[in-house]
Image (cartoon, rainbow, N blue to C red):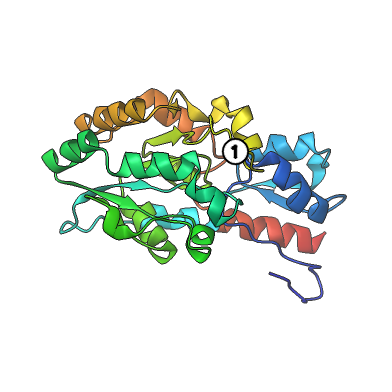
Amino acid sequence: MVSYVSYLKYLLLTHGIRYFKTKLEKIEFYNLIRSKRNIISTSPFEYQMLIKYHHSEKYIHKAGLTKYDRFAYIKKNESERDCILISFTYRSYDNKTFEKSLLKKNFKSLLNNNTLISILKNYNIDLIYIPHHHELYKNKNFDENQLKYAKFYDNSYLTHYIEQCSLLVTDFSSISFDFMFQNKPVLFYLIDANDTLDFPEKSYMKNKNESIFFGNGFTKENEVIEKINYYIKRKFDIGEKMKQNYNSVFFYKNNIRKRIAEIVNKIINN
């Protein structure tokens, strides 16, 4: 979003923490904000990435994403069942490549896995599948009628289920941070890490970012299902150690909008 008020050259808003797609960030993000641009960093991981790109610490301010403030006021609708969200990020290959990709094969297998469905039915838990909006735009997802149990929704429902679901299965989507902020378990399933197909996003998985997985990174479907069952039995409690890990991802977990306002005022006054 561009602002034309006298004291701001522009205002760049991001939908999530910048971390996973470091090569992409360097091209699309850093080149835009290089030199003496003020940046509000949302996470120590993001902060270190900016330092790596040689951005001056003087112009990096610590706060968070404004949307996180609302998580403190979320009240789960008692009439709604518990749910697990599955959402993988975008792959830029074309539809023909998608049809023969491990991504399609493996997420179709996971969503229709009989063992997983049996576990969820036993505990009366919904399985929600929301593909990346670009995947839907390019018609790269199989028909929802092929789903045995999972409920299919488009991206307009994503915010609701980020707030309502108790566990996330993803690969390297930034919504993982939304769940971490709420102390909800995140399972990182590198669903097509072994694909023989070549696609730009594959480079993200080579790094695997183990530092952010906190022991919940997987390449096999059965391991993901075992971990889902583990957290269901614990009523999605991640334990104190994992809470500490998740808390370390953020600079602050309260009064974020107030902090941002103070930072902006300080920039303006200077």
Q: Residue furthest right?
A: 35
**Residue at the image point whose x is 47% and y is 42% from the top:** 103
- Picture coordinates of residue 141 (x, y %)? 43, 56
**Residue at the image point whose x is 29% and y is 33% from the top:** 228
- Picture coordinates of residue 97 (x, y %)? 56, 49
Amino acid under disc 1: Leu
**Residue at the image point whose x is 31% and y is 59% from the top:** 144
- Specify whether 124 is left or right of 245: left
**Residue at the image point whose x is 32% and y is 27% from the top:** 222
On screen, residue 268 above or below 124:
below
Quarter occupied by the N terminus: bottom right
- Specify whether 115 is left or right of 36: left
On screen, residue 140 above or below 137:
above
On screen, residue 119 above or below 260:
above
Q: Residues within 10 Å of mark 1 (few under 14, many from 20)?
A: some
Q: Secondary structure at mark 1?
A: loop
Q: How many marks?
A: 1
Quarter occupied by the C terminus: bottom right
- Picture coordinates of residue 66 (x, y %)? 54, 57
Residue 216 visible in the displayed image:
yes
Q: Residue furthest left?
A: 122
- Specify whether 193 is left or right of 117: right
- Specify whether 44 is left or right of 111: right
Residue carrying label 1: 197
Residue 75 visible in the displayed image:
no
Q: Quadrant of residue 267?
A: bottom right
Q: Quadrant of residue 262?
A: bottom right
- Picture coordinates of residue 204 (x, y %)? 63, 36
